[in-house]
Amino acid sequence: MNIRKLTIRKTGDYRELAPLFAAAGLENTERVPEGFRFGFAAEDENGALAGGAALVKAGNQYVLHDIAVTEALRGKGVGRRLLCSVMAAFQDMGAERVCLAAKAPAFFRNYGFSEIDADEVPGLFHCQECESFGTKCTPEFMVMELTKERLLFVDSCVSTHRSRTRQLCDAWIRRFRKEHPGAVTDIAMAEPGVVQPMDRELILLRNELIQQRDWEAPMFDLARQFRRADYILVGAPYWDCSFPSVLKIYIENIVVADLTFRETEQGYEGLCPCRELTYITTAGGPVGEMDLGYDYIRGVGRMLGIRNFREYRAEGLDIRGADVDGIMAETLEKINHG
């Protein structure tokens, strides 16, 4: 499966996801959980179910009731994408605290969850009533306290191998989470088939929707996501003096008049409150002053209202005799120390 082509769809049908949860060994999946609000279905490029999650609100408590990935696809990033979508949705719902019962606590700990006693979440779980509790099933009760902060990771780490750009981005995100506990991470995947180029037909449709101020139209999903972000990370390898063309297509989708910017008598006025945009790139050869991708990102960012920018880059990685490990380690050191 190409994880970059994974799509995550919102669903109001718990029964659509229940067989996946049951196959993963989750308990009490034969009935819709009390307080179920909606779920997410992760689908591969062929539309097959790769994972799912169910969100519950019980009184004033928010619960990640179920989350699972099909066995064959575990460890490929499906769970990461799902959990990021879930936590962004909880934040949109106004949650300040999210609880769960985890069979794999180490996974959730990486994203800011911590263990609590069961009596700290009364009425949310019924694990103690289950005959498997303490024997076949020994979950950890966990909680994450949410802030209002949101990071958007624009992932254009297109690669035919283990992406070095993605390695640097992952390190930056780990540092960000330590510095901003409780912030949630949203992901925008810049990938052909996931983002659509603006041809004549789509431009006409966009202009019509802008005139109608129909900002909830699916066409504006990426632009709304971008506008919500407090911090933005863009990861893109250095291609042809800039970046992969699919990132330009993504940008075409987020530059929307009266949504992410507006025209005034003095020029463009940005409508995005992002505090800082970070750009990470890797290059096989030297970049030097030909850093046109970063220049372009800063230009678009300023148009949309962003004023603070930072770049990390590792270059010369494919030059014969290059100390690749040393170059990457030096860049990682810069990232880890801000």
Image: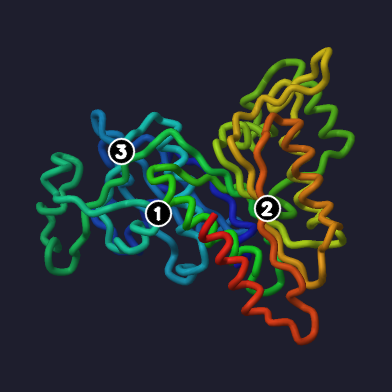
Can you name the residue that lies furthest to the top here? 265
Query: To which residue does mark 2 refer?
Result: 311
Mark 1 Cα shell of 10 Å, populated few (<14), some (14-19), many (≥20): many
- Percent x, y of residue 102: 28, 57
- Percent x, y of residue 219: 70, 33
The amino acid sitting under disc 1 is Tyr
Structural distance between the alpha carbons of marks 3 and 2: 33 Å
Residue at 39%, 29% in the rendered image: 94
Corner quadrant of residue 332: bottom right
How is the protein colored in the picture?
A: rainbow
Query: To which residue does mark 3 refer?
Result: 97
Relative height, residue 315 to residue 292 (above, below): below
Q: Quadrant of the C terminus?
A: bottom right
Query: Could one spot residue 129 in this view of the protein?
Result: yes
Query: To which residue does mark 1 refer?
Result: 111
61 horizontally vs 225: left or right:
left
Which of discs 1 and 2 lies nearer the camera? The answer is 2
217 horizontally vs 17: left or right:
right
The amino acid sitting under disc 3 is Arg
Structural distance between the alpha carbons of marks 1 and 3: 14 Å
The amino acid sitting under disc 2 is Glu
Q: Nearer the viewer, residue 229 or 195?
A: 229
Mark 2 Cα shell of 10 Å, populated few (<14), some (14-19), many (≥20): few
325 horizontally vs 297: left or right:
left
SS for dot 3 = strand
Corner quadrant of residue 320: bottom right
Corner quadrant of residue 180: top left
Relative height, residue 319 to residue 203 (above, below): below
Q: Are marks 1 and 2 in contact (CB under 8 Å)?
A: no
